[in-house]
Amino acid sequence: MLDLNKVAILAENKHYRVGDLFNETGLRWAKDIQTVLTEPMFIDTILRDYLLLKRHHADTYIMSRVIADHVERHNYTVPRPDDLVIHMRLGDVVVNSKEHCGNRPLWAKEMYVDLFGGLRPQGFKRVVIATALHFGANEDIDRYHFSEEAKETSFELIRYVEQQCVDAGYAVALHSNQNVDADFAFMASSSHFVVAQSAFSKIVAKCLLSPTAQVYKLRHSS
């Protein structure tokens, strides 16, 4: 059984929001880009290096090159070639959002019903759940703050996916870090990747480092 005490909780990740800043979306992307570019704490991060080097909007080529450079220089952990990496976007969205899945909240269990029947992936031996509980903590609109409800709901969903993996006969591991770049690099280095219903996850899918990497989509995602 996975130790959920090892799931990283990013209780106030206000600025380093890869999906919003890469796609230039959301309420404060322009302001947060300047923060990432100027604040010392973001020096030598994937997102800052990308913002400095990108040639145009949503430059996946440059992003993938930056990720590869950081994997090598920081010796980030990468999946085994026979790992199926399932990204789960958890945290604030499980109680704050309906727009991610139409009229269904992002965490709705029906998205993960019959997980392997919907995915039909091949060539892997172990499942790695890559996740962290992310909270954007936007004071301007008083949303996306940490709550125990969001934490417990997120944990319930991890257990739901874990049990399906076990029932299907697969070993299950957890990959979760306070360092967003460590998780970004790990997922982008996967050979078999399951996309979550999030902008961050879709960026990972477009920037996978292996040209033979396989991308899988949940049957109830858009």
Image (cartoon, grey):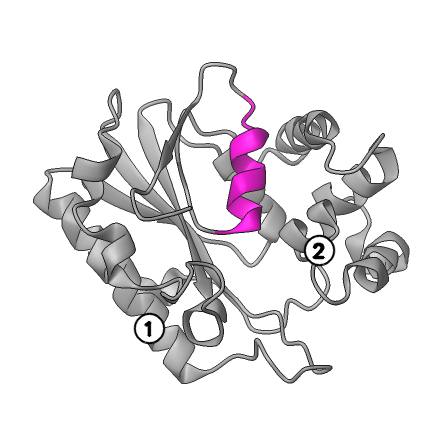
Badge number at residue 153? 1
Compared across the picture, whether 90 is left or right of 157 comes to right
Q: Position of residue 14 (x, y in %)?
A: 69, 68
Badge number at residue 62? none
Is residue 185 something one can see in this rendering? no
Sequence order check: which comes first, mark 2 or mark 1?
2
Read off the residue under disc 2. Answer: 25
Q: Nearer the viewer, residue 76 or 50?
A: 50
Q: Is residue 77 above or below residue 136?
A: above
Q: Position of residue 110 (x, y in %)?
A: 24, 57
Compared across the picture, whether 20 is left or right of 158 comes to right
Please name the residue shown 43% across and 62% down the image.
90
Q: Nearer the viewer, residue 87 or 69?
A: 87
Q: Position of residue 217 (x, y in %)?
A: 36, 37
Is residue 98 something one can see in this rendering? yes
Which residues lie in the magenta part?
198-209
Q: Mark 2 or 1, which is nearer the eye?
A: 2
Magenta residues: mostly which secondary structure?
helix
Quadrant for residue 86, please give it: top left
Judged from the image, the secondary structure of the residue bearing numbered disc 1 is helix
Please name the residue shown 59% across and 80% down the image.
143
Task: State the residue lying farthest toward the front.
Answer: 103
Mark 1: which amino acid?
Answer: Thr
Please name the residue shown 16% across and 49% down the image.
164
* Other-residue count near label 1 (Cα within 10 Å), few / some / many at <14 / 14–19 / ≥20: some
Compared across the picture, whether 120 is left or right of 101 comes to left
Does the segment drawn in magenta span residue 66? no
